[in-house]
Amino acid sequence: MNCKSLFFLVVFSLALISGVFAQKKVSILGDSYSTFYGHVSPAANLCWYGVPGEKKENDVTKVEETWWHRFIHEHGFQLERNNSYSGSTVCHTGYEKADYSDRSFITRIHNLGVPDIIFVFGGTNDSWAGVPIGTYQYNGWMKADLYSFRPAFCYLLASLKQLYPAAKIYNITNSELSEEITDSMDEICRYYAIENIRLHDIDKQWGHPSVQGMRSINVQVWESVSPILEPSVPWPAKN
């Protein structure tokens, strides 16, 4: 083997190793469960956890205790963007039927950076606020349709697949939501071939995950994500 061939072999090997061990970038599209003051983007997004001067009956006091921080740092990922907004709904309808189009999940879909993995973690406020459920609608959305949960969630997943074709998308469904919201997310995720991680037995304080609950979310999310990670093959290698 001549020097030129050896040089190209070394470069190729280094590139392959870099691809295998490069940190995968994670973006989160979430609500209060994924917030922590000073760690969301845009920074003006309302937060529930870690807000200076606010005392809540919840033992999560450090960003390191959140589910997403644990997931990223325990498993070697990199945070690309945490676009979480406390109190936000998937659809444009909020509490007391207010217009939440300024903060809804479907409004924030364009601000997730360039991720390898996207976690969608919403539906909690839609359930708590009793938003209109609507009908399953997989195309032809008008703005008026997006004030109901089912058409909005369909639009959300369809748009994410189109905007981030190289990313692996996961939906996370909170425990203790209404049957309509939970079943709707299941059905729509199946339609778009997106894995739906249905959480169970999440400890909560004041309606939000405690430190123990955050640990449980991290574990349950990792159980769904880990089977696709093959250290001998640059991820993603499967569809």
Image (cartoon, rainbow, N blue to C red):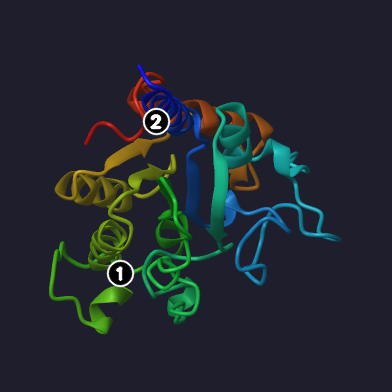
Q: Position of residue 161 (x, y in %)?
A: 27, 56
Q: Is residue 127 visible?
A: yes
* Residue at 39% from the left image edge and 44% from the top image edge: 173
Element assignment for label 1: loop
Give left or right: position of 238 versus 32.
left
Q: Does 86 sit above or below residue 72?
A: below
- Name the residue nearer the viewer: 89 or 190: 190
Q: Position of residue 126 (x, y in %)?
A: 41, 61
Residues tagged 2 and 1 counted as in contact (Cβ below 8 A): no
**Sooner in the amino-acid sequence: mark 2 or mark 1:** 2
Instruction: Please give the residue where the numbered disc 2 appears in the rendered image.
Output: 8
Instruction: Please give the residue where the numbered disc 1 appears in the rendered image.
Output: 132
Q: Position of residue 17 (x, y in %)?
A: 46, 26
* Residue at 44% from the left image edge and 65% from the top image edge: 89
- Judge the density around disc 1: few (<14), some (14-19), many (≥20) Cα neighbours within 10 Å: some
Q: Does 232 sit above or below residue 49?
A: above
* Residue at 40% from the left image edge and 57% from the top image edge: 127
Inter-mark Cα distance, 2 to 1: 60 Å
- Name the residue nearer the viewer: 101 or 157: 157
Element assignment for label 2: helix
Dividing the picture into quarters, in which one does residue 13 lie? top left
Front position among marks 2 and 1:
2
- Judge the density around disc 2: few (<14), some (14-19), many (≥20) Cα neighbours within 10 Å: few
What amino acid is labelled 2 in the image?
A: Phe
Q: Position of residue 177 (x, y in %)?
A: 40, 47
